[in-house]
């Protein structure tokens, strides 16, 4: 399994139910064999007030244990739509302190 982490080109935005909850020119792109690339945002560029910690955890043999967050919007809660590796494995240490978002009907991750 090969994982590459590079600086994501341009400025990136996350919209949840139409509201901007993250915007960054310092995002990272994680490219993992067999998966779509994932954009990771520095916590400092995320409106953390919209995120609620979740009970969910998962483990990736290459990245470590992921913690999840739900996003509270005006009309709905997007369950487990955000994840973070609080103590990532050494090979992916660059994503420590970063958050990733699962795009869907009410959540968009876009390059501006």
Image (spheres, helix red, strand yellow):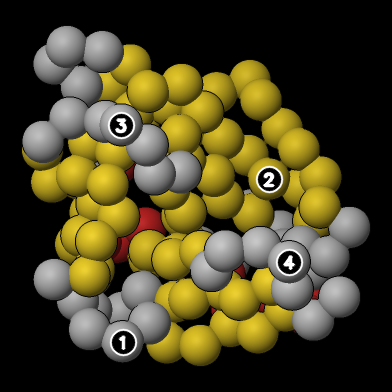
Q: Nearer the viewer, residue 14 or 55?
A: 14
Q: Which residue is mark 1?
A: 9
Q: CA distance from mark 3 to mark 1?
A: 24 Å
Observer-nearest of 3 and 83: 3
Q: Which badge, 2 or 3, comes first in the chain's sequence?
A: 2
Residue 77 percent location from the top left of the image? 33, 16
Q: Nearer the viewer, mark 2 or mark 3?
A: 3
Say if residue 62 shows up in the picture: yes
Residue 72: x percent and y percent?
28, 21
Up the image or down, 25 lies above or below 99; here it is below
Mark closer to the chain start, 2 or 1? 1
Is there CB contact under 8 Å for labels 2 and 4? no
Q: Identify which residue is drawn at 13% across, 71% down.
A: 112
Image-based side of 69 in relation to 75, left or right: right
**Which mark, by number, is residue 66?**
2
- The residue drawn where x is 38% and y is 63% is 41
Q: Which residue is mark 4?
A: 34
Q: Secondary structure at mark 3?
A: loop
Q: Is residue 68 left or right of residue 1?
A: left
30 and 63: which one is in front?
A: 30
Q: Gap in Å between the C-alphas at discs 1 and 4? A: 21 Å
Q: Nearer the viewer, mark 3 or mark 1?
A: 3
């Amino acid at each position: 399994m090969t994982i590459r982490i590079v600086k994501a080109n341009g400025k990136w935005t996350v919209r949840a139910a139409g509201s901007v909850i993250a915007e960054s020119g310092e995002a990272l792109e994680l490219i993992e064999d067999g998966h779509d690339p994932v954009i990771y945002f520095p916590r400092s560029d995320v409106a953390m007030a919209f995120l609620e910690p979740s009970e969910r955890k998962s483990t990736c043999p290459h990245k470590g244990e992921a913690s999840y967050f739900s996003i509270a919007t005006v009309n709905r809660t997007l369950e487990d739509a955000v994840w973070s590796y609080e103590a990532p494995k050494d090979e992916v240490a660059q994503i420590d302190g970063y958050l990733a978002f699962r795009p869907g009907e009410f959540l968009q991750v876009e390059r501006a």
